[in-house]
Image (tube, rainbow, N blue to C red):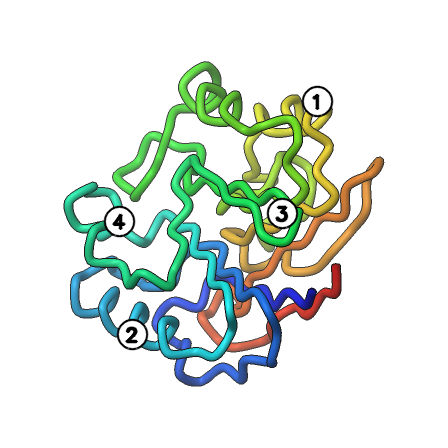
């Protein structure tokens, strides 16, 4: 089963070459302003791709998905994961869009108890975890060297121990690393200057 994974496309989705695969995963910030027009453009593009399964986890720019009534407009062939999961061919996927912060971004949650309540929902049998935020200290550094990942997330990862953890959010830190039994991937396609610098990840399960 082949996964094709990307994140942080910020309206540049039409300019990205998407490899063939079975499951397409987008880990957030598919839009830049989160408007209806931006979102509908992206959803139409995603819906028409040939991949059998499509998984979308919104990011902090994707305001459209904050309103439950608007989530009903997501095409039926797109699995929108907001603190929810699904099983595909025996693999358990779980997705959450929340990011740490107290600013007026989509799906922002205060660091500490508030954001931890979301991570506590992650089932222990999760094979593939998709969050928009990275965990603190893992592919989460901006160009100045400051780490912006979530401090609460690594604590849950010690319990859940997914095989794979996909995220984005921090454009500067795109890449991969392995820690303990989990392979981590920052899937950001754009750099900090909103230039396309990376290609989607292709991974065979």
User: x%, y% of residue 29?
Assistant: 40, 58
Can residue 145 be seen here? The reply is no
Spatial distance from mark 1 to mark 3, Cα to Cα? 24 Å
Q: Look at the image and tell me whether residue 135 can be seen.
A: yes
Q: Residue furthest right?
A: 180
Q: Which mark is residue 141?
A: 3
The x, y position of residue 184, in whole percent, is 71, 48
Q: Tell which circle, 2 or 3, labels the residue nearer the N-terminal end.
A: 2
Q: Distance of mark 1 from mark 2, alpha carbons?
A: 37 Å
Residue situated in front as seen by the camera: 66 or 110 = 66
Task: Compare marks 1 and 3 and give the one earlier in the sequence.
Answer: 3
How many C-alpha atoms fall within 10 Å of the one at disc 1: few (<14), some, or many (≥20)?
Answer: few
Calculate the distance from the C-alpha at mark 2 to the C-alpha at mark 4.
Answer: 15 Å
Q: Residue at image x 49%, y 81%?
A: 16
Q: Which of the pair 89/161 is nearer the observer?
A: 89
Q: Secondary structure at mark 3?
A: loop
Total numbered circles:
4
SS of the residue under disc 1: helix
Crowd class of label 3 (few under 14; some 14 to 19; many from 20; radius 10 Å): some
Q: Nearer the viewer, residue 166 or 9?
A: 166
Circle 2 residues within 10 Å: few <14, some 14–19, many ≥20: few
The numbered dot on residue 44 is: 2
Q: Nearer the viewer, mark 2 or mark 4?
A: 2
Q: Considering only vertical position in the picture, is 98 above or below 132?
A: above
**Residue 156, quarter of the rendered image:** top right
| Residue name at image x 52 percent, y 21 percent | 120
Q: Is residue 98 above or below residue 3?
A: above
Mark 4–mark 1 Cα distance, whole angstroms, equals: 29 Å
The residues tagged by marks 3 and 4 sit, at their Cα atoms, a distance apart of 27 Å
Identify the residue position indicated by label 1 in the image.
159
Q: Find out whether the residues at labels 4 and 1 contact each other: C-beta distance under 8 Å.
A: no
Mark 1 / mark 2, whichever is N-terminal: 2
């Amino acid at each position: 089963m082949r996964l094709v994974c990307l994140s942080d496309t910020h309206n540049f989705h039409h300019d990205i070459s998407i490899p063939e695969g079975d499951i397409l995963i987008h880990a957030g910030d598919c839009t830049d302003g989160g408007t209806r027009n931006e979102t509908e453009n992206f959803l139409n593009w995603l819906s028409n791709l040939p991949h059998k399964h499509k998984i979308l986890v919104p990011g902090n720019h994707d305001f459209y998905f904050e309103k439950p009534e608007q989530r009903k407009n997501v095409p039926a062939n797109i699995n929108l994961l907001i603190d929810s999961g699904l099983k595909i061919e025996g693999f358990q996927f779980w997705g959450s869009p929340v990011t740490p912060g107290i600013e007026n971004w989509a799906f922002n949650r205060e660091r500490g108890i508030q954001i931890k309540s979301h991570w506590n929902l992650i089932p222990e049998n999760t094979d593939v975890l998709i969050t928009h935020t990275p965990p603190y200290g893992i592919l989460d550094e901006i160009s100045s060297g400051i780490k912006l990942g979530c401090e609460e997330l690594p604590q849950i990862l010690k319990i859940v121990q997914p095989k794979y953890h996909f995220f984005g959010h921090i454009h500067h830190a795109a890449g991969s690393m392995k820690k303990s039994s989990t392979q981590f991937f920052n899937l950001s396609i754009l750099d900090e200057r909103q230039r396309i610098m990376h290609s989607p990840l292709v991974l065979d399960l």
